[in-house]
Image (tube, helix red, strand yellow):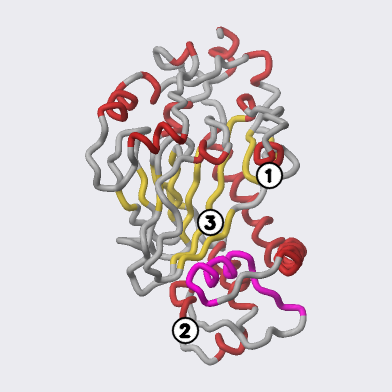
Amino acid sequence: MSNLLEEGNIQLPELRKESVFHFDTSRYPFREIVEEILFEENRNAVKSTDNPTLRKLHLIKEPQSRPEGVHICPALYRARLHNGLMKKLCQKDHRHMRKRWKKSAGRAKLIETYEKFVAECIVPLFRPIEDNSIEKGDEQGYKIDRDSKEERDEQGSKVGEETHEGDRNRSSVDGWSDSKDVLNPSEYLKKGLVYQAEPILRCSFPSPHPHSKPHIDADYHHQVEEVNFWMPLTDVYGTNTLYLESKPGLGDFHPLEMRYGDVCKFWGNQCRHYTVANETSDTRVSLDFRAMHGVFFNQRPDENDKCNASLKIGSYYSYTSYG
């Protein structure tokens, strides 16, 4: 561990704390890029709408036919499907939609800007801090409570319920400031940042139905060392935002009130989060992604698990050195 202390310090507890930071929207014009993507298929409808904005995206109806070469974006398809505004595509058409999206100029531009954002804004958050001692207790690595999804469901995760004794105990132990793995100094300097290769674009129209129930990302096979980043491209507030707890099992659910240019960092792998029915008159559009120290990345997930099999560098993840 002495080599690690000499070479740098990975501040895992600090990375896991919920925080919001701001970025330069002129250097990383995510909203303008996404507007171009989402409005492309609705050129005629957009032209006839006064000052079209993402927050009023739900007012633009599904076109009778699309211009040649223009196809629906998967995020917009999911939003319309959720609200019953479109019929579910057959497997063949869904596959074609995905292929066209992967080849689209809009997606390429989004990923180009995203990769620049990761390199200039996310990597510095993870880059080890020089000449800084590891906090007491961290030398032993992380200890994560690994309750199964079924066990958490039995405890109950409904919003508004009194926090269960088991949850209070879980959040009061060292699990919040410890990790499952002891850092390996011999491997550490060879690693950099592992991050989601493509950010997830999401649209949420006003609707009586929520898009997600309370969950943690570990339920979906994600590695415990991941940190989540949530970037709204519209102002979010009230029922039109993401709700989360500040520490695992604490149950202090609170809505994020943010504006375009804000990014929330949180430990979604172990902190429960969810959305509620969007009862506002505005559409919510956002990007989200995950990142983690490469030194912790499990390059050999359970090959018998089909979900884990795709969570590899070169497919779901990309890698960049700290430089």
Tell me the quadrant of the picture where the N terminus can be found. Answer: top right
**What's the residue type where badge 1 is placed?**
Tyr
Query: Could you tell me how far apart the alpha carbons at marks 2 and 1 are, in whole angstroms?
Result: 36 Å
| Picture coordinates of residue 211, whole percent (x, y) | 45, 59
Crowding at mark 2 (Cα within 10 Å: few <14, some 14-19, many 20+): few
- Based on the picture, tell me whether residue 75 belongs to the magenta stretch: yes
Q: Which residue is mark 3?
A: 287
Tell which residue pokes out farthest to the top in this image.
2
Sequence-earlier tag: 2 or 1: 2
For the point 64% across and 50% down, which residue is it?
116
With respect to residue 310, does 107 lie above or below?
A: below
Query: Could you tell me how far apart the alpha carbons at marks 3 and 2 are, in whole angstroms?
Result: 23 Å
Tell me if 98 is positioned left or right of 176 in this view.
right
Crowding at mark 3 (Cα within 10 Å: few <14, some 14-19, many 20+): many
Task: Identify the secondary structure beneath mark 2.
Answer: loop
Task: Identify the secondary structure beneath mark 1.
Answer: loop
Query: Could you tell me how far apart the alpha carbons at marks 1 and 3 are, in whole angstroms?
Result: 16 Å
Tell me the quadrant of the picture where the C terminus can be found. Answer: top right
> What's drawn in magenta, residue-wise?
69-85
Question: In which quadrant of the rendered view does residue 161 lie?
Answer: top left
For the point 41% across and 13% down, which residue is it?
137
Tell me the tag on residue 316: 1
Question: In which quadrant of the rendered view does residue 75 lie?
Answer: bottom right
Residues at badges 2 and 1 in contact (C-beta under 8 Å)?
Answer: no
Tell me the tag on residue 249: none
Judging depth in this view, the residue of 88 and 252 nearest the camera is 88
Q: Nearer the viewer, mark 3 or mark 2?
A: 3
**What's the residue type where badge 3 is placed?**
Leu
**What's the residue type where badge 2 is placed?**
Asn
For the point 63% across and 34% down, which residue is it?
193
Task: Identify the secondary structure beneath mark 3.
Answer: strand
